[in-house]
Amino acid sequence: MVSKYKLNDLAKNLNVTVADINAVLGGDVVRKPNTVLTEEELNLVFEHFTQANAVESFNDYFASADEPDEKPAEKAAEAKKEEKKPAEKKAPAKPAPKQEEKKPAQKPAAAKQEKKQPEKPAAQTKPAQPAKQPAKPVEKKEKPAEKKPAEQVVRRVDTRTVEVNLDKYNEHYDQLAPQQNKRSDSFQRKQKINQKSQQRAKQKYSTKRETEAQKLQRLALERARKQQLKVLIPDEIVVSELASRLKATVTDVIKKLMGLGVMAAQNQVIDFDTASIVAEEMGAKVEKEVVVTIEERLIDDSEDNADELVSRSPVVVVMGHVDHGKTSLLDRIRHASVTATEAGGITQHIGAYTVEADGKQITFLDTPGHEAFTAMRARGAAVTDIVILVVAADDGIMPQTVEAINHAKAANVQIIVAINKIDKPHANPDKVMQELTEYNLVPEQWGGDTICCPVSAVTGEGIDNLLEMVNLVAEVADLKANPNRLAKGTVVEARLDKGRGPVATLLVQNGTLHSGDVIIAGMTVGHVRVMTNDKGAVVNEAGPSTPVEITGLAEVPAAGDIFNAVEDERLARELVEQRKFDQKEEQFKQYQKVTLDNLFSQIAEGEVKELPLIVKADVQGSAEAVKQSLEKLTNDEVRVRVIHNGVGAVNKSDVMLAQASGAIIIGFNVRMDQAVRDSIEQDDVEIRLYRIIYDAIDDVKQAMKGMLAPKTREVELGRAEVRAVYKISNVGTVAGAYVIEGKVARNALIRVVRDGIVLAEDKIDSLKRFKDDAKEVAQGYECGIGLEKFNDIKEGDIFESFIIEEYRD
């Protein structure tokens, strides 16, 4: 805002009359002294007097500063005259400064001359100094010559232009400004105002003039407004946010949208194209905003260069129908016994193993064949390179065999058919190959491209040929990975261990996983604390196609989750929290609200009986499989709803939830401690524990039909704690146990429990007190127990003694 000048104020500042300014402005109108001049009139007056008083150089002005030094001689003569009149000494001294002020009236440096004048009268007190004056002109002539190059700089400022860049002249203005004016800018004097009318009048006419700094700031703001506005617009933007970025009102933006035929409120979302058109019409320059998510910043999904890739071992998954010999075949390949530890000889969850064949490493994944484990087979096919489809020669193609074929084709992996059990008398491999052609799997023997290998898991026939075919297919596929990058892979299985916490089995697919790395696996994050291979040995790193078991995660991840090793732990935790939030949002969206349309159906569903269940399993994959299988049993009359499923032993919180909801606890391969048992008896909660998934499904199915009539039941006799383990030649492993509850009978069955997980069920081979055989051992006594099959006994294991008895309702 430009300062307002009255005509008389301007005349005083310029030391001219009002008539002179009227003559400059011209026109027929005679302006009064109190007339406020406009900006154009001020510019005209300033330009006229600037041109009129312009000088080529300030040399004459600076030279005139030395002339007053000659006047002390005249003043000394006057002082002699004044000696005769001592009463009038001080009177003649005042006119001298007044005359000197008038000489440089129109020169801009008048303030400097005023400062020099008061200093020189001190020389008047010594009349004897005029004799020394002839020596001074020599010095006075030399001084201007020294000052010229340092101080005298002529700068011309053309004020006729619209904008004047005065930034480089600020220092010059400060030097010329009087000190009195500088003090008045920052110092406000106290004024005594007696009446409010005077105060209002003072406020009305006390507007300060615009300082140079304020003027420069105003000009900078005006230039900034004239510059074109740049806005960043994402793919989608809310109308109110667009208005904020355009520094405009929401109403203006909505008007532009209406002009384009788009009717949108301030909280509605518009696309990038519409927003860019609106921004351009409002004079803004549009740039597209690229939103980089936390996942993109944290996880590197860039492709590897060809020179960084190295060969890796193949990942082979063994699939097929239940009881067709998958685990036995893998057992023969591994030269180890894993079938004996599975309940009923049925694989319950995925196992990952590394086998060496012909000097090359092969990673095997064993998947369950039961129909309940469809999701686990799909995960196995998704992370593999080769599928070995096991088909029994005496049984042929079965439903789970067809499902395995479909999974393998969906994953686009090579299929090798292993025709097992050729050692049986009713084996018919040709029938199996004939049935394979119905699913577009033509054997090589018949001119197709599907490799078929007759094998026997019992005798070992054809095993070497099968491994040779696996290496051949892997060599043709030319499998490669980059070990020199952060690890990425899949969670094969996960469980909650009582002593170690969450334990996850990982398959590294690319990169190298090191001990201590920060990893993200689905909805959980943590450090790799301990890493063990399939042999149980602790390792510090795992390359591509290597299965390892790790601890250190905050929670149990879901089987099938992708894991990534990252560098920034803080961003990793932010990403996990964001994923959890998105999952909750998705669950809220799936929630169906009651409306008038579905109100009747909601009321009708109140008549449907509901069977709430709580599922606890030893590993995450099994818990998911049991949950899905049980929920599939829902019919029109009874709806099965799993209100909670988890990993680990049954605990008190599960019992409290079951009591509050009236649910039945289904335990799969898990046990519970004595405190939980007491809580179950006290709260009268029904709990059923199973080792084989068939039994759980059949029991729930019969219970839904109202025909559950069990003929046998398990009666617990007692519990014993293993306190010492002895290995005796020709006998085997013997456990030195102490009976802590009930009794242990010779004809009873033994369930081996370690950290709440059931390891095996076996019969007692020998029960002794000292060296004598015992029929039973009561509570508080020690005994030696030997089992028939299970020998992996450790100190701290719990032996649960029980019998199966028949009963009638």
Image: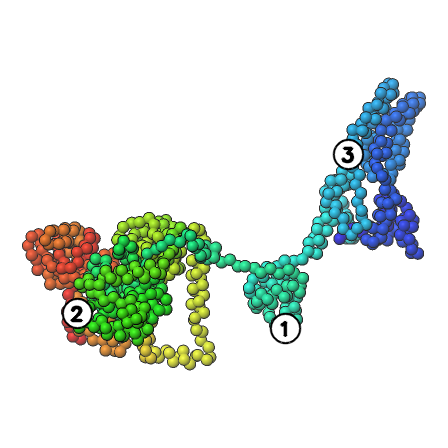
Whichever of callouts 3 and 2 sits on the residue coming sooner in the sequence is 3
User: Measuring 27% from the left and 50% from the top, which residue is drawn there?
Assistant: 537
Amino acid bearing label 3: Glu
Asked whether 639 or 35 is in front, the reply is 639
Element assignment for label 2: loop
Q: Is 177 on the left or on the right of 688, as rendered? A: right
Asked whether 302 or 202 is in front, the reply is 302
Kindly identify which residue carries mark 3. Answer: 151
Q: Quadrant of residue 66?
A: top right
Disc 1 crowd, CA 10 A, few/some/many (<14, 14-19, 20+): few
Camera sees residue 773: yes
Kindly identify which residue carries mark 2. Answer: 424
Disc 3 crowd, CA 10 A, few/some/many (<14, 14-19, 20+): few
Q: Is 350 on the left or on the right of 782, as rendered? A: right
Colour scheme shown: rainbow
Amino acid bearing label 1: Gly
Amino acid bearing label 2: Lys
Element assignment for label 1: loop
Asked whether 407 or 528 is in front, the reply is 407
Kindly identify which residue carries mark 1. Answer: 261
